[in-house]
Image: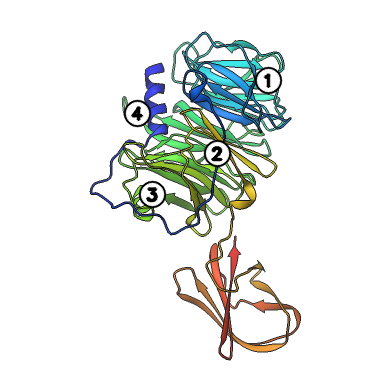
């Protein structure tokens, strides 16, 4: 079982398929941002870094090899060392929101818990597990279970105070659970599972399901495909989930809108074309906000490593940095904390990771609601108006409009699909363009 987990971990860290053909490396035509290195632990302590998080006081806790360290977020100085885990490398760490508990899986795989204030470590869960998540209020722990006779079930729920098992969730036909996350409101679990079809002795498929924690008897199938969902994360508003996704032939980013049922993919082929080299590795996607994710790519040799942001609504790269972060991404105030497996920890300012680019002249984002746009003018004038999609195709002709100084309401004469659109106003020889978002 642990061998299986190592293989799965390797698949998460590097996308396991090489694209055919060679692409000449070019710089992508998107803005670059800089990352400031806080600390290079690879020069001071042994082992690979598994992850780093902001503590409530603004300092950083990082697991490197089998040991957590607390470092000063400004100087990079190691302030304190927590107990060493005697059982191999600690992987897939998570920090409780109050910063008092650090959890990670260790050889077995078992779950290890560090009490951050004292630095002491315990092993409170004897069951082998796959992955885990902590409830937003910090009171419960949800772990996914492999298919084992000694502890049947899909998900085990624990009390975060004493780590006693509260409940085990089991569903007919579901054999094992892997990646898991809990919605920001604490009401829903998103889980990737294995399902063995009725009457079959060996065939199984993979699914993504949603479990309503107020009605644990039932679940909803989100994605019934026979694919591997290697990670799972809710967006901050709970409306989307993002996964590192592998269908057996390709690895890509999968994004699902729980409200509209829309699926989006960020595929390796388009990233290779955009960045100008054969993309080999793809990192775990992490939401920066409701509309933007951050992930990482690299080539086969690892000599090219980019971390980039992707606007989900516009379906495109917004900016990138030359920093490979395929371990963890954390946030505090305006800072984004990055950590890669080599032990390099860095941060960037969240305000320089824009949701909206500035590719159009005189561009602003207009407010859109119920087929109406709000446009503010500093003068009165007549203008001809149209709506385009991002491919340049006109989707609505609104005709001539009389604009007044101040607030103007523009009626859109047809329903628009979810996405980003361009509203243009032509007055004489002058034309201005503005974007607006339909959600």
Q: Which residue is mark 2?
A: 233
Q: Earlier in the sequence, mark 4 or mark 2?
A: 4
- The spot of residue 344 in percent (x, y) is 51, 31
Local packing at callout 2 (Cα closer than 10 Å; few below 14, some 14-19, many 20+) is many
User: Mark number for residue 149?
Assistant: none
Q: Earlier in the sequence, mark 3 or mark 2?
A: 2
Can residue 43 be seen here? The reply is yes
Q: Which residue is mark 4?
A: 199
- The spot of residue 209 in percent (x, y) is 51, 37
Q: Earlier in the sequence, mark 3 or mark 1?
A: 1
Q: Residue at x 54, y 71 (%)?
A: 360
In front here: 430 or 151? 430
Under circle 1, the secondary element is: loop
> Extreme left residue here?
21
- The spot of residue 263 in percent (x, y) is 47, 51
Mark toward the viewer: 3 or 1: 3
Question: In the picture, which quadrant includes the C terminus?
Answer: bottom right
In front here: 132 or 29? 29
Q: Which residue is mark 3?
A: 267
> Extreme right residue here?
406
- The spot of residue 310 in percent (x, y) is 50, 51
Mark toward the viewer: 3 or 2: 3
Q: Earlier in the sequence, mark 4 or mark 3?
A: 4
Q: Earlier in the sequence, mark 2 or mark 1?
A: 1
User: Mark number for residue 160?
Assistant: 1
In this picture, residue 375 sits left or right of residue 320 = right
For the residues marked 4 and 2, what is the alpha-carbon distance in whole angstroms? 33 Å
Q: Earlier in the sequence, mark 1 or mark 4?
A: 1
Please say if the residues under marks 4 and 3 sit with CB atoms less than 8 Å apart. Answer: no
Image height check: is 316 above or below 432? Answer: above
């Amino acid at each position: 079982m642990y061998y299986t987990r190592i293989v799965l971990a390797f698949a998460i860290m590097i996308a396991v398929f090489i694209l055919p053909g060679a692409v000449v490396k070019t710089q992508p035509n998107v803005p670059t941002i800089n990352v400031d290195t806080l600390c290079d632990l690879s020069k001071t302590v042994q082992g690979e870094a598994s992850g780093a998080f902001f503590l409530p006081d603004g300092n950083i806790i990082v697991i490197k090899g089998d040991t957590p360290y607390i470092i000063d977020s400004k100087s990079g100085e190691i302030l304190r060392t927590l107990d060493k885990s005697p059982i191999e490398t600690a992987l897939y760490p998570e920090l409780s929101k109050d910063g008092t508990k650090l959890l990670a899986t260790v050889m077995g795989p078992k779950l290890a818990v560090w009490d951050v204030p004292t630095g002491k470590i315990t092993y409170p869960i004897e069951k082998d597990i796959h992955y885990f998540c902590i409830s937003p209020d910090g009171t419960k722990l949800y772990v996914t279970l492999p298919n084992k006779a000694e502890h049947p079930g899909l998900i085990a729920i624990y009390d975060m105070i004493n780590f006693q098992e509260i409940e085990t969730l089991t569903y007919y036909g579901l054999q094992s659970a892997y990646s898991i996350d809990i919605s920001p409101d604490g009401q829903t679990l998103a889980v990737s599972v294995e399902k063995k079809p009725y009457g079959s002795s060996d065939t199984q498929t993979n699914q993504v399901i949603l479990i309503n924690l107020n009605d644990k008897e039932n679940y909803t199938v989100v994605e019934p495909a026979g694919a591997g969902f290697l990670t799972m994360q809710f967006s901050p508003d709970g409306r989307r989930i993002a996964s590192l996704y592998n269908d057996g032939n390709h690895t890509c980013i999968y994004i699902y809108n729980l409200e509209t049922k829309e699926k989006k993919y960020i595929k390796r082929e388009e990233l290779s074309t955009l960045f100008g080299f054969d993309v080999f590795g793809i990192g775990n996607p992490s939401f920066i906000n409701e509309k933007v994710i951050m992930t990482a790519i690299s080539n086969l040799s690892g000599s090219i490593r980019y971390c980039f942001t992707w606007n989900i609504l516009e379906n495109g790269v917004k900016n990138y940095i030359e920093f490979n972060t395929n371990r963890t991404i954390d946030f505090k105030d305006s800072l984004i904390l990055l950590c890669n497996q080599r032990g390099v920890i860095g941060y960037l300012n969240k305000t320089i990771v824009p949701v909206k680019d500035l590719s159009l002249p005189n561009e602003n984002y207009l407010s859109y609601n119920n087929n109406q746009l709000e446009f503010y003018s500093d003068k009165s004038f007549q203008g001809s108006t149209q709506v385009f999609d991002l491919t340049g195709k006109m989707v609505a002709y609104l005709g001539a409009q009389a604009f007044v100084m101040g607030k103007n309401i523009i009626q859109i004469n047809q329903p628009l699909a979810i996405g980003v659109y361009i509203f243009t106003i032509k007055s004489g020889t002058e034309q201005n363009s503005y974007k607006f978002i339909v959600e």
